[in-house]
Image (cartoon, rainbow, N blue to C red):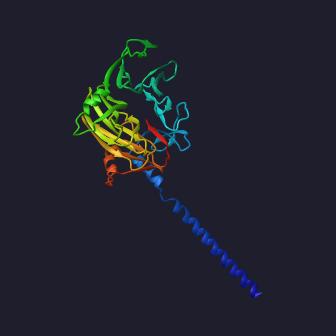
Amino acid sequence: MRTVLFAICVGVVALLAAACSLSGETKEKPEASSQPTAEDEGLARLREARVAGTLYFTDRSCKLRAVRLPGLRPAQLPPVEGHCRFSLSPDEEGIDATSVRWSPDGTLKARPLPGHIELATDSTAWRFTFQGFAPSFKPDGTPTFVREGRLLAWTKCSSRNGVAFPDQTSRCAREVFSDADLERAFSDPARYLRAVYTIKDVQWLDDATIAVLVHSHERPGRNIENLVAIFRNRGLIAVPHFSGEPYSDFRLSPKRRYIHARGDDTGRVYVFRRRGDEVSTVLVSQRASNGLAFSPDERWVALGNRGNMTVVRTDQLRDHYYMTGRARLIPVPLRVFDLDWR
């Protein structure tokens, strides 16, 4: 009998010990889960910095999504076409492929085609196709394009549905820049290659100033270079960058104070800042980047990486470029393929 009672007591003690142990573990769990994660800290820093706006992005499956900053709440999407890299209209009502350029008011879009450009209204109520490449729009809404080494701006000599357009003979287009201007600008052999210079793409910084992606090669075909050059009224004012790597995805920030492009070979992002006549390189990403977007007020820039997206103040881009440690990168728990910020 004593043996039985002793066994029962031992069993009760063991059960109590186990219960206490489980109780202790239960109490510790909330303590462990209360520790903030890197994602929580990133969102808290977005709120603290009052980062705002709507972030549009495609995920790794090329599905378009939209979230409101800083809380990452889902936002309404415009009608969607399937594009991994995309271009969002200024009024946020239309989405198209990344190569499409929009007029400042979002009513027109220009789509590059092989050897041609298709101009259409956003609703595609009408379309017009003509010879040329590198479509762009001046800040006043004037469409421009490149044909046979000449940058042409449309003039209002004829119209359809109230929109002026050029015919195939360029009767309705006026030359504003050309490859000949490039040849003159880069004619000093002490500073530049003795090469053939051609226009690859154009963006308008204001109604008289353009950023030009320039392709150059020596006449025998060696020493190919690509550069970004800034011109005002045909005169060269800055050359912020040379590279043996070709560029594409040439874009402007919302207020046209920053220019950015993607390297075709490495996927690196190049960012240039304009202050008056001074244009400087403020970022060359250290590795391939999945897109870049400026906040509407240009105080912040979002960078897509292989892992989480990061946000950094634009006035700290040079610190990030030179890895000084002063740039405060904010991690955001989103994996993006391309992005835009409105």
Residue 13 place in picture, x, y as percent: 66, 78
Q: Nearer the viewer, residue 13 or 261?
A: 261
Query: Where 274 falls versus 306 (above or below)?
Result: above
Residue 113 place in picture, x, y as percent: 48, 27
Check the image and name the residue furthest to the bottom.
2
- The residue shown at (33%, 46%) is 317
Q: Is residue 82 visible?
A: yes
Q: Quadrant of the N terminus?
A: bottom right
Residue 3 place in picture, x, y as percent: 75, 87
Q: Quadrant of the C terminus?
A: top left
Residue 137 place in picture, x, y as percent: 38, 25
Q: Is residue 275 visible?
A: no
- The residue shown at (53%, 59%) is 33
Q: Nearer the viewer, residue 51 or 334?
A: 334
- The residue shown at (50%, 29%) is 94
Check the image and name the residue furthest to the top.
158
- The residue shown at (27%, 27%) is 234
